[in-house]
Amino acid sequence: MSFSFQVEATSGAARAGRFVTPHGVVETPVFMPVGTVASVKGVPQHILEELGVQILLNNTYHLYLRPGVETVRALGGVQDFMNWQHPILTDSGGFQVFSLSELRKLTEEGVQFRSHLDGSLHMFSPESALAAEIGLGADIIMAFDECTETPATHARTRESMELTLRWAQRSKQYFENHKQEVPWFERETREHGSEQTQALFGIVQGGMYADLRRESAERTVEIDFPGYAIGGLSVGESRETTWEMVEATTPLLPPDKPRYVMGVGTPEEIVRYVSMGVDMMDCVLPTRAARHGLLFTSEGKVNIKQARYVRDESPLDPKCSCPVCRRYTKAYLRHLYASGELLAQVLNSIHNIAHYMQLMRGLREKIKRGERLDVG
């Protein structure tokens, strides 16, 4: 089997399990740091391994533009390219194309857009986006979808949802016809004695309307994917609305397949989503916040820019076992940030990712013990 998923324990709606990919096993619930251009900003791969990162997210849109899919394919796929021999998930590029609203043109066929790098004209369709994802070679790839803008009317959102459903069918058909074209397919098949291919996940849309979310979930499940994502969130709506959409959708997704909420969130939000039965999450927040001096600790957020830390000899988080907290004081971290040192961004990012990894380990342990999760 190229991909399989099993729930091993539950606590309320929360689940602890694992999924198997050609590049390793991932324990869930899991948070995936974002390595947009095959790099988690400021943190090298060997440090990610030391922190316990199980799986990364790469961005199809950015890698398609630079260095190009054929370059990555020629180098053996994203794992060999970035020397990360662990699972990787690639998004379809739909969200990035959506964010280029002034540079794109949407049709039934796909989305025509201009590169943010040089203004060159490109086209993503379900088929071409899947061709790019297959060429990049990640373990889990996403169907091409339209991320509906917010706010949008019910009629506009339904139109967008219907388009995403048609694109999901086309994505699956293309994948079934071309899934053996993965860069590492022949090598993995030879070594493991079975056909090792990617897993294609479907994406639920429906904007900020619970009825459309439910309909999208039911109809996407009918297409039959090995996993399901809830997309189109964190695009400007309130947190309460995001929670409402996830709560409306999650119970309709198959209990024997992984559930993935895309583009979330803060540590507090992650606990809430896990308590709803979500298995997978990703977000740029840990490293983005770190670059601006915002650090997450067991005692709450720390804004390391503040003058109160100038002579603070305590570790950032006394309960954290990461290399930053074991070695450096708040005073030193504050000095690095105030001085504009690149090391500040590196150390801050390492700590924030470590905090997220420790959070996920703690959640998995609580679920396995049958404990209820504290969602605040």
Image (tube, helix red, strand yellow):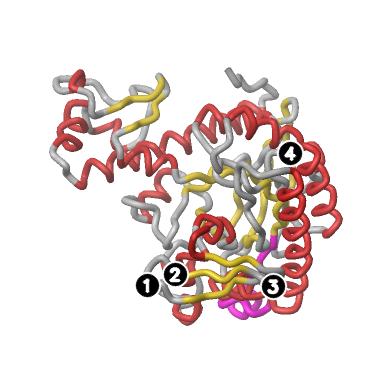
Q: Earlier in the sequence, mark 3 or mark 2?
A: 3
Helix, strand or loop at label 4? It is loop
Asked if residue 38 can be seen in this view, the reply is yes
Q: Earlier in the sequence, mark 4 or mark 3?
A: 3
Q: Residues within 10 Å of mark 2 (few under 14, many from 20)?
A: some
Determine which residue is flagged by label 3. 109
Determine which residue is flagged by label 2. 115
Q: Earlier in the sequence, mark 3 or mark 1?
A: 3
Position of 203 with respect to 51 (left or right) is: right
Q: CA separation, marks 3 and 2?
A: 19 Å
Q: What percent of the width, then of the height, locates residue 236?
A: 54, 39
Is label 2 in contact with label 4 (beta carbons under 8 Å)? no
Helix, strand or loop at label 2? It is loop
- What's the residue type where badge 1 is placed? Asp
Determine which residue is flagged by label 1. 118
Q: Residues within 10 Å of mark 4 (few under 14, many from 20)?
A: some
Q: What percent of the width, then of the height, locates residue 30?
A: 58, 42
**Which residue occupies the foreground of this view, 45 or 252?**
252
Q: CA separation, marks 3 and 1?
A: 24 Å
Helix, strand or loop at label 1? It is loop
Asked whether residue 226 is drawn in magenta, I would say: no
Residue range of the region highlighted in magenta in the rendering: 180-200
Position of 189 with respect to 235 (left or right) is: right
- What's the residue type where badge 2 is placed? Ser
